[in-house]
Amino acid sequence: MNRIYLDNAATSWPKPDAVYASVDRYLRQNGAPAGRGQSHEAAEVSRQIAQLRTRIAELLGAPHAGQIVFTFNGTDSLNLAIRGIVRSGDHVITTQVEHNSTLRPLRSLEQQGEVELTIVRCDDQGMIDVDDVRAQIKPNTALIALNHVSNVTGTIQPAQAIGKLAREHDLVFLLDAAQSLGHMPVDLQQINCDLLAAPGHKGLLGPLGTGILYVAERLVERLAPLRLGGTGTKSELMTQPESMPDKFEAGNHNVPGLLGLGAGVQYLNERSIADLERHERSLTKQLLDALEATEGVRVQGPSQLVDRLGVVSFQLGQHEPGELATLLEMSAGVQGRPGLHCAPLIHQALGTADQGGTMRLSVGAFTTTNDVVAAIEGIRQLATMSLDF
Ligand SMILES: Cc1ncc(COP(=O)(O)O)c(C=O)c1O
């Protein structure tokens, strides 16, 4: 049976061929660390990493390449952003749609008595209302942390309006672009965000173990690094260099991962994000239309296609999500993900918290119409069997 991979929200797969080739070539033929040593190979690696930084800055509309910090995943980026920016006594506003990679660092700071935390509720389609965020702003509010696109329902949040609100009140705006970057245009100038965290291994099509954090110029001094150590620069100092991006990039890079990410970003540029967005939206529509027409299936998330991207959560009859995932894989080779998807709070709004969450299917750059047809047929078969019971 064919493997039908519909778990791109967890990590994208397959990757463009150039990603495999780039990792393989580096490991076999180069093997040097970046920014350390004078060998031809080390210089070549540093050049390629600098080129990747520039490409990502261009993709986001960031003024300078030096504002892009490489991290090891989305969680790493969010931890640096959150724990690096808040100060004792700050009030932070976040939302019910966040991933645990935002919620847990914030809750931990709250439990330590460092910050006051407000979690703004979403509606039953996973949408945040900008007025609800506005209503929570207090004199000591310092940060708004928002998940751009839900990894449970695909709901696209009004990031631009929240960015504008943050700017009006001189607050730091952190955007978690884990499910948007690479799937839709994300323009920093339009959104007005100060910190943007994203993995390299999802929509940017790089390998696992890669991530990025964009840091606005005005925050470079204020953001504290979490990891200190060797940068290959200013080695005479016993203190961390203040220059970007060294301030936040202590220790050796994941060079094979970053060079693979470079090939992923180049693929995105050649294919264009606009084309990818069209492709993923058309597959999402195909999947949603079929699921909504299938008796016993309850689809979560926005009813309007414009309000969502290619992450589709549903329930079927009385099946537990875990059971549904097993049955779908056994009967149709379809691999999605069951459960809470590391975003426990949104399930309270959806009414799926007590049912073990949802079954999630998520499309990506290489998902085909046939993959979606196979998933639909598999779900219909299970639905028919459930009705017969
Ligand atoms: C919305 C969201 N934020 C953060 C993360 C964490 O990213 P990573 O798995 O790269 O640490 C994920 C991953 O699933 C996510 O979907």
Image (tube, helix red, strand yellow):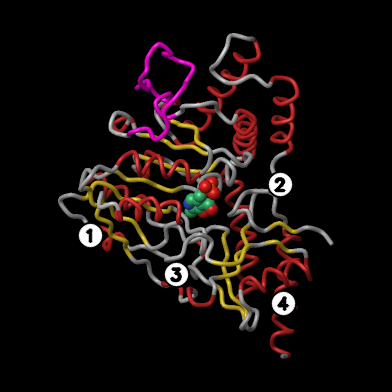
* N-terminal-most mark, 3 or 4: 3
**Toward which corner of the image does residue 42 lie, by quadrant?**
top right
Q: Which mark is residue 380?
A: 4
Residue 282 coordinates in the image, percent (x, y): 62, 59
Q: Amino acid at mark 1?
A: Gln
Q: Nearer the viewer, mark 3 or mark 2?
A: 2
Residue indicated by mark 3: 125
Ranked by sequence position, the earlier of labels 4 and 1 is: 1
Amino acid marked by disc 2: Pro
**Vertically, is 241 above or below 3?**
above
* Label 2 beta carbon within 8 A of ligand 1: no
Quadrant showing the C terminus: bottom right
Seen at 74% across and 72% down, the residue is 378
Work out how far the residue at label 4 is from the one at label 1, CA to CA, in angstroms.
44 Å
Coordinates of residue 329 in the picture (x, y in percent)? 74, 66
User: In the rendered image, which residue does mark 2 sit on?
Assistant: 14
Q: In the image, what residue occupies the spot 22% across and 59% down? A: 136
- Magenta highlight: main SS: loop
